[in-house]
Image (cartoon, coloured by chain):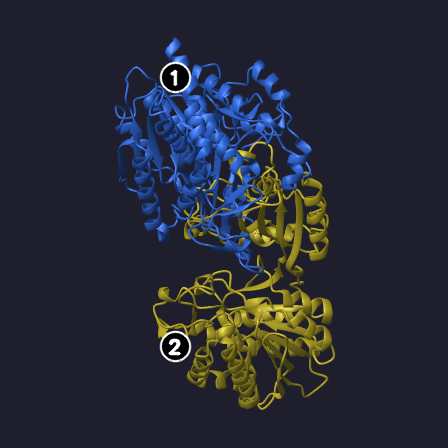
Chain colours: A yellow, B blue
Amino acid sequence: MDAALSYAQSHHDTFVDELEDLLSIPSVSTDSAYADDVQRAATWLADHLDAIGLQHTEILDTDGHPIVYGEHVTDPAKPTVVVYGHYDVQPPDPLEEWDTAPFEPTHHNGSIYARGACDDKGQMFMQVKAAQAYLSGEGELPVNLKYVIEGEEETGSMAIESYIQENGDRLDGDVALISDTAMFSPEIPSITYGLRGLAYAEITVEGPNRDLHSGNYGGAVDNPANVLSRLLAGLHDADHRITIPGFYDDVRDLTETEREAYAELPFDEEAWMEAIGIDDVRTEAGYTTFESLTARPTLDVNGLWGGYTGEGAKTVLPSEAHAKLSMRLVPEQSVDDIYDKLEAHLQAEAPNTVSVTMRRLHGGDPVLVDPSIPPMQAAKAAMQEVRGTEPVFVRNGGTIPVVADFQRHLGLDSVLMGFGLDSDAIHSPNEHFGLDRFRQGIEAIIRFHQRYAAAADSR
Amino acid sequence: MDAALSYAQSHHDTFVDELEDLLSIPSVSTDSAYADDVQRAATWLADHLDAIGLQHTEILDTDGHPIVYGEHVTDPAKPTVVVYGHYDVQPPDPLEEWDTAPFEPTHHNGSIYARGACDDKGQMFMQVKAAQAYLSGEGELPVNLKYVIEGEEETGSMAIESYIQENGDRLDGDVALISDTAMFSPEIPSITYGLRGLAYAEITVEGPNRDLHSGNYGGAVDNPANVLSRLLAGLHDADHRITIPGFYDDVRDLTETEREAYAELPFDEEAWMEAIGIDDVRTEAGYTTFESLTARPTLDVNGLWGGYTGEGAKTVLPSEAHAKLSMRLVPEQSVDDIYDKLEAHLQAEAPNTVSVTMRRLHGGDPVLVDPSIPPMQAAKAAMQEVRGTEPVFVRNGGTIPVVADFQRHLGLDSVLMGFGLDSDAIHSPNEHFGLDRFRQGIEAIIRFHQRYAAAADSR
């Protein structure tokens, strides 16, 4: 391992130069104007995996953007780590708020500024460079590695689930390793052991067969926009608990141990509120803010529209109204079950004056990984060695559907070892990634492989 | 009067030809692309008033579209009737749904088809032709007449109130006469004795200082779209009464006499529901559908927007959400008082997690005219003579702000003698107006002037 570490150290500048090449390709997956660039990034990455000595590198076409695959499998006795990442990025808009061009990587205050610098090109590239450090520094790896790098994470990861389902043999392994999350704070490294799931629905309330004049019809026609407001408002009670019957049935509550660990985290609620400009929080009764953000289910309206939304006044009684709403789920809730319960509840609550329909737009199951398993402990030790501080295990309020897919289809637990920071401005203008964290990430991954292999060997 | 009636009969075809000329001018007031046409319609109308023998005809410039004025004042002993109408029209969209071009008047099944055929060029022109029939047929009028014809009724009547306020002497009169309403049904003529008012507001709920990721922030940040839904839903109780404190304080309830008269109206609720495609009504508890449509106050959401409203799923927790909402008011509610009460209620209900602001967009006070006063009885007798059926007095759920302005600033009651039908498709494609009703309207107005003058004379 020492040779790998010293190779990484001595080649740091080269690694950064290479990352800049990748960051220069505007692989925006959600906008078809960039389709060629996404393809170009896939090609660049596959060539790169090939160049550092991976085998069977391949660009797999999908209905959307391609998946890049590469592996280094030499010894069935070694444990196999499946590495996931993504090479696509968010759109750079609003462009005018960037201090430097989003696809012309720039160094400033020890960070590299570019769209994708952190999410996820920078973090994914740490995984690639760790393998290279072993292969070039040591001549071999302590583990078998399989890389699955997708190109449409920012636009819904449509192709990856069926790819995982259909490639069970190829992706056979012992654990998944992902660098696509943030640390608890700049001072406190963390490993994510839980992710919330997501059930995202679109609701339509239809009333009269056309828009009506509110003077001629107001007073006797149940207004779909008013009905929608009633339905949405009724989804929470005064304790901010969700009222859908059975919604909490499968929720596994935080254990006492978890709550105690959470209580020790230096979560600065005042600073957190100030950063987003709110005067008070609204949480489910009985839970702290940090618990509510990461380990309790939610229901949020993501979009709302209906009737006249232009300038001035138009006295329309709209024929329909719409909402997009999503629920973040926690273990052991399941997307399909929650969709069913929401739909049944809406139908039960809908008055006979309107019709209510629900579309299921996008889902992902929640995930929980036992922090005590060997790969989690290997990650903890690796991060501690690099950072000098013991990392904490925390849950994350977001959703990474592929993690649930790995668990469901391959039986793989995922180690979410991320080096991002909330201040990295992912999805925002001036995204950046500290070069110290880029270096530490590579080193931590090198150490993870070594420790995990040793733990697997000792069993 | 007989000479006036026979003049109108013998010149019917000429009157229709002239109306077609006016209907051919696309005087769409809300779209600046038509500004020259609106001006052209004003000029056409002023020239026409001049040609039929009115005095002091004038095109009055305003901040918006001009007001056309003309009068025939000969004898201070005669009562003075102030006629109001409008020469502007709604946009013709959607154009593809018209069977014939909206500004190329066409005859079909005894009706004239064109934008404005009924609302209000056709009905306003009846008022003009009645005066001409007297002046050309009799050589004189039984009343003094003052015409105020505006050009921005369809875009908010912005200029007319200050014009009325500033021209109290010029508009001095005994009653206002307006043909801009519909009959109760094709068989039952009606005179409108009440109009609802309007208070139209825009509400904004602002939460965090930017759109947030619903995974990272959901569960502790009060979502402005959810808050807006709660606020809107809370504005009605289970009886569909409006919950704003003091909202009903000044409502003058329907009298027993009114309710009995209403009960005798052949309002076909099933047919009404079927026409707009609803399975059930939703009215304030204790009131019939027709009462609720015309004589009870309402609160309707006219528009709703916030967050992500495009295709697919975006997991945004929106920083703000908006609604346009309007209340139809009934006597003796006042716009300003209701605005104040709504705003106070919203502020009282708003949680401390967000800020709520309200803008007052557009208002008009409600109106009630005593059906027993001489001009109302003159209108009733005139319509009965023409139609052979006794007209009913009904209230209308809509708002014509100028009627309240006449009452407030000039002390004028308005006689709303309209010959439209709900099936005339005003504001919709294929607007039309029955030529029989055009003829009957002119005749009824001729008879109104005679009867009203006689009643005034006998006092």
Task: Chain letter for mark 1, please.
Answer: B
Q: Nearer the viewer, residue A137 or A457?
A: A137
Look at the picture and state if A392 lies above or below A36. Answer: above
Residue, disc 2 = A104
Kind of residue sitting beneath label 1: Ala
* Labels 2 and 1 touching (C-beta < 8 A): no
Q: Position of residue B148 (x, y in %)?
A: 34, 32
Quadrant position of residue A207: top right
Q: Is residue B59 above or below residue A103?
A: above
- In space, the residues marked 2 and 1 are separated at their CA atoms by 85 Å
Query: Residue at the spot x=47%, y=43% of the render?
Result: A280
Q: What amino acid type is highlighted by mark number 2?
A: Glu
Q: Quick one: quadrant of the N terminus of chain B?
A: top left
| Local SS, label 1 | helix
The chain that hosts pointer 2 is A
**Residue B40 seen anywhere in this rendered image of the structure:** yes
Image coordinates of residue B266 in percent, x first then y, are 65, 26
Out of A77 and B213, give the one closest to the viewer: B213
* Outermost residue toward the top in this view: B459
* Residue marked by disc 1: B453
Residue B385 in the image: above or below residue B199: above
Quarter occupied by the C terminus of chain B:
top left
SS at circle 2:
loop
Q: Do the residues at discs 2 and 1 belong to one chain?
A: no
Across and down, in percent, residue B40 comes to 32, 47
Residue A114 tag number:
none
Left or right: where A389 falls relative to B172: right
Whether A352 is drawn above or below B5: the answer is below
Foreground residue among B425 and B391: B391
